[in-house]
Amino acid sequence: MQIPTQFQKPSLPPTTAPSLSRAPEAKLQTPSARATDRATSGFEARSSFAPASKSPVALTDTPAPTSKGALPLNSPQAQAAIQKTLDFVQRGQPGAASRGLVPTTDASKTLSPRAVERDALGMTHVRMDRVHEGVKVFGEQVIGHLDREGKVAGLTGNVSSIPAGLGKTEPKLSAKEALAVAQKDFAGRTDREPSVQRAIYQAKDGSYHSAFHVELTNTSKLQGSERPRRMNYLVDANSGELLEKFNQIGGIELPHKGGAQAASAKSATPAPASGKVSTPDTEPTSKADDTTLYSGKVDLSTTKNKDGTYSLEDSTRGKGVVTYDAQNKEEASNPVKITDKNNVWGESADPTRNRSAVDAHYGAEMTYDFLKNVLGRDSLDGKGEKLVSNVHIGTDFVNAYWDGKQMNYGDGDGKDAGPLTTLDIAGHEIAHGLTERTAGLIYSGESGGLNEAMSDIIGTGVEWYASQKNKAVEFDWKMGEDAWTPANGDGDALRYMDDPTKDGYSIDNYKNFPKQTEVHGSSGIANNAFYLLVNGGTNRTSGQQVKEGLGMEKGLQVYYRALEHYMTPKTTFAQARQATVQAATDLFGANSAELQKVKDSWSAVGVN
């Protein structure tokens, strides 16, 4: 069975391992700025954010594109880092042996490079999928970490011994038969081509199986009370037993709230017509004259169309931020542009159905800016990935979800929820895309709870970021409170990071995990650990206190670095603790007060 991941350093001189000294009073700078200062002993303070604008914040301290980010796998730099990591494993260094990596004559046959990232501290991280006898091992990865001098400083990820023959022995079931097993359980139509792949799968009891990994998706052909699904199935390749299944689409709504309302194929309100754009021009302005439902007056970045109207298409951020009208269909199968005559959005005379789109567009813009200016990442993929949002999904649909490609927002039913386009919900759902493109946390068990927690953490971070530049935005530790049960007027929320147990469903301590393994409910463990790290406080269940916190920016940097470089698809809560410990060590040093706060916050929630 896997044991808690630990970043273990090989027997190298102390000077080869990353070590950053830091003045106690220094404030954490953004990763992009930190790259230019990494040779110094402290970091220059960054005390404020630029005001909202139609254009993205200009970063004068952004390093050259080659200084950080993903390296092409076939590039000389990536190939050198991959080879050093494989050589480290192949030689049977202590850091490799302790993870179950037995030296082989050719380590390249057991580890397949997935990504190579160079970070702002000068370290290089080599993420590799485990392979057994030519077959990928589901969810198992090993990450090699190279220091600034290019020497292997450690490994992340644990693996267990796999019986010989599981990969090379021909399975009794065909791929078609395994697909049939999954389709029988799915019991519905699909709207994307099914995916069927051979895999080696480790069951909950630690045993390995020859298996097929099947993915079936339906987000646009829903019937009755059916919800959007991206179902993952692990089918035993010999017996046909269904070993595990989980839905990668979770949504913001909780099971204990009664479930999301079913989306209807009938449109409640006719969708406005929208002309095509042949030569769009970005229309910059400098005043906050666009009215949102939840965030007051804002300044959106839009596009002027050839016919003189404006549409919610922002070309100033990465490869674009766009918002469409899904016309009350279950999914944005044929979305239309949302237009305005004078580029002043949300006016009382504007179509009512355009109002939630203003919030969705603003939420995506703030999420993009947050990722870039706080986390130092250019959109979800680090390369400016286009952010697409679709509003008016279904009719009275009480949910919002990331479908693997884009955002989808329901209008709510007016009772349980209003339009689910608040800042924290937008950040939460878009962050699922960030997790998919980094650690890939499996949406089941402990890794699923961490997946949900990372989205809550990023969503809260987006709300915090926007509150620094927009006085109408109120930052708090609640999730979705502005949209949830608007008629009550009592500020209740979907989740509470300061006290997860307040919703009557979530848990705040690992000792209660066996009682609540559903991913939204178990997310409270990491949510509260993050809250205690940032803000300080006491865990309700354990009574343990964390005195004072690090502040939002430092806390976000620690968790994001852990997600990006030290978590794997099967990371557990204990492994997440180790991932954040190593991230804090990288950022602040092995003897820092910040590192101790990270440890204290996890201990308070019962993760040691």
Image (cartoon, helix red, strand yellow):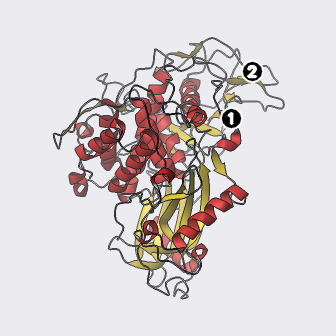
Residue 557: horizontal and vertical position, in percent? 46, 38
Q: Nearer the viewer, residue 191 or 475?
A: 475
Which type of secondary structure does the marked residue at label 2 adopt?
Answer: loop
> Would you place residue 287 above or below residue 138 in this image?
above
Name the kind of residue labelled 1 in the image. Gly
In the image, which disc is placed on residue 270?
A: none
Q: Quadrant of the N terminus?
A: bottom left
Frontmost of labels 2 and 1 is 1
Name the kind of residue labelled 2 in the image. Thr
On the image, numbered disc 1 is attached to which residue? 320
Q: Exactly how many numbered labels are in the figure? A: 2
Residue 422: horizontal and vertical position, in percent? 47, 29
- Mark 2 vs mark 1: which is more N-terminal? 2
> Would you place residue 303 above or below residue 186 in this image?
above
| Left or right: 478 as drawn, with respect to 235 | left
Res 277 quadrant in image: top right
Q: Nearer the viewer, residue 608 or 341?
A: 608
Tell me if I can see residue 586 in this picture. yes
> Would you place residue 184 above or below residue 169 in this image?
above
Tell me if I can see residue 383 in this picture. no
- Crowdedness of circle 2 by 10 Å Cα count: few (<14), some, many (20+)? some
Residue 48: horizontal and vertical position, in percent? 51, 19
Residue 183: horizontal and vertical position, in percent? 51, 69
Residue at position x 56%, y 49% from top? 123
Residue at position x 36%, y 37% from top? 594
Residue at position x 55%, y 49% from top? 403
On the image, numbered disc 2 is attached to which residue? 309
How far, Cα to Cα, is label 2 from label 1?
A: 19 Å
